[in-house]
């Protein structure tokens, strides 16, 4: 159990789906989606899965870099969705419109391949990136940029008339996967929803800088979904438990992304899946132990080295993900840790 499993970025059994950038590159044939009365959508496996098996390689529907001082930072990713590799500062192609320093490509080929998608966001970034960062916050800017990139990907999907959802069973991909994500106005505190609503009205309404056909209400709903489902990207894996000795954290975040299929995974503080983005920004799920038929496959939504005791894990999940963790580990620790304070708290909304 204490042995660390390292994922490989090139699973030998990976199936590459050519020509459709909205489908995951690999879904293990025994990985299935089911619905739980309390948790909603979830992953299960239909047969025994050995430790180390790669279960999912999902492409982001939208991804943004999250770095300080992008011009000096080697972790900035290429904006071309077919690439998303790190673009080191000595070898970059910049936007001729100089929209924002966070937008870069590895080379002119990547920039040309990304012209339709970046054309959707360029004027918006140039007009609003600085204002949102200074008047609101870096976090709010990142959140709105992810939304703009979700709308941009949808724009490209419609433009390219990509056929989705046919070739891989009942999985929902692309924009229909985004529409199926959990999260709504009821999930979040009223103050947050009110603040997001103000941001939508100010910065995300259809305008010459951001022409789209999505209503302000739908964009607000999209923020509620994105906040419940986006992943941070880190240089090392998330989900090793028991923690290796000495513990290894997942490192500094360099990007954030929304994955239509990976987002189905629920949380456990004793996960059987470790996750990490590969060098193209694709989210890779790997079994960290043998998984039994019918068992749910869970990831950890946070760095397990960071929140170690029951109270801090539950408080973090309640604040950031709006549910009370009832995983096997939390329930077993309830009997050993002081939990009276928790039960004295008022009832909270469940997802
Ligand atoms: Zn590139
Ligand atoms: Zn630009
Ligand atoms: Zn838990």
Image (spheres, rainbow, N blue to C red):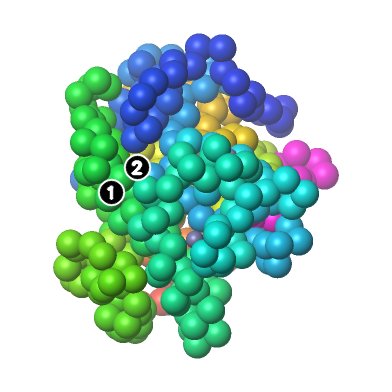
Label 2 and label 1: CA atoms lie apart by: 13 Å
Q: Position of residue 247 (x, y in %)?
A: 77, 46
Nearest the eye: 167 or 245? 167
Q: Residues within 10 Å of mark 1 (few under 14, many from 20)?
A: many
Whether label 2 touches label 1, CB < 8 Å? no
| Residue 154 disc label | 1
Q: Position of residue 210 (x, y in %)?
A: 31, 67
Q: Position of residue 237 (x, y in %)?
A: 64, 40
| Residue 260 disc label | 2
Instruction: Please state if 61 lies on the left or on the right of 342 as rendered.
Output: left
Q: Which residues are magenta?
A: 243-254
Comparing marks 2 and 1, which lies closer to the viewer? 1
| Identity of the residue drawn at 38% across and 45% down | 61
In this view, the residue farthest toward the top is 13
Nearest the eye: 184 or 223? 223
| Identity of the residue drawn at 36% across and 16% down | 29
Q: Tell me, yes or no, whether the highlighted magenta stretch contains residue 320.
A: no
Q: Is residue 55 above or below residue 201?
A: above
Q: Quadrant of the C terminus?
A: bottom left
């Amino acid at each position: 159990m204490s042995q660390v499993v390292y994922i490989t970025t090139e699973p030998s059994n990976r199936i590459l789906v050519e020509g459709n950038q909205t489908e995951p590159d690999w879904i293990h044939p025994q990985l299935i989606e089911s619905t739980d009365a309390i948790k909603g959508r979830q992953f299960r496996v239909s047969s025994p899965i050995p430790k180390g098996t790669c279960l999912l390689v999902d492409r982001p529907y939208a991804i943004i870099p999250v770095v300080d001082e992008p011009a000096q930072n080697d972790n900035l990713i290429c904006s071309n969705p077919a690439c998303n590799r790190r673009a080191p500062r000595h070898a970059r192609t910049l936007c001729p419109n100089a929209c924002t320093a966070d937008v870069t490509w590895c080379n002119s080929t990547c920039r040309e391949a990304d012209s339709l998608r970046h054309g959707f966001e360029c004027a918006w970034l140039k007009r609003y990136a600085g204002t949102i960062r200074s008047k609101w916050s870096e976090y709010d800017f990142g959140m709105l940029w992810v939304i703009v990139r979700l709308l941009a990907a949808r724009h490209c999907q419609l433009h390219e008339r990509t056929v989705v959802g046919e070739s891989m069973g009942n999985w929902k991909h692309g924009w229909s996967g985004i529409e199926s994500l959990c999260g709504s106005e009821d999930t979040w505190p009223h103050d947050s929803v009110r603040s997001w609503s103000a941001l939508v009205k100010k910065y995300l309404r259809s305008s010459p800088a951001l022409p789209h056909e999505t209503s302000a209400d739908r964009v607000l709903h999209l923020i509620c979904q994105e906040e419940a489902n986006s992943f941070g990207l880190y240089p090392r894996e998330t989900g090793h438990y028991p923690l290796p000795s000495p513990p290894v954290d997942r490192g500094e975040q360099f990007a954030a992304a929304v994955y239509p299929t990976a987002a189905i995974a629920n949380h456990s503080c004793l996960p059987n899946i470790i996750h990490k983005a590969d060098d193209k920004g694709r989210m890779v799920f790997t079994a960290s132990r043998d998984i039994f038929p019918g068992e749910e496959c869970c990831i950890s939504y946070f760095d397990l080295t960071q929140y170690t005791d029951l109270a801090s894990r539950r408080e973090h999940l309640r604040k950031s993900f709006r549910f009370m963790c009832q995983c096997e580990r939390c329930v077993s620790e309830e009997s050993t840790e002081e939990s009276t304070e928790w039960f004295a708290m008022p009832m909270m909304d469940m997802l």
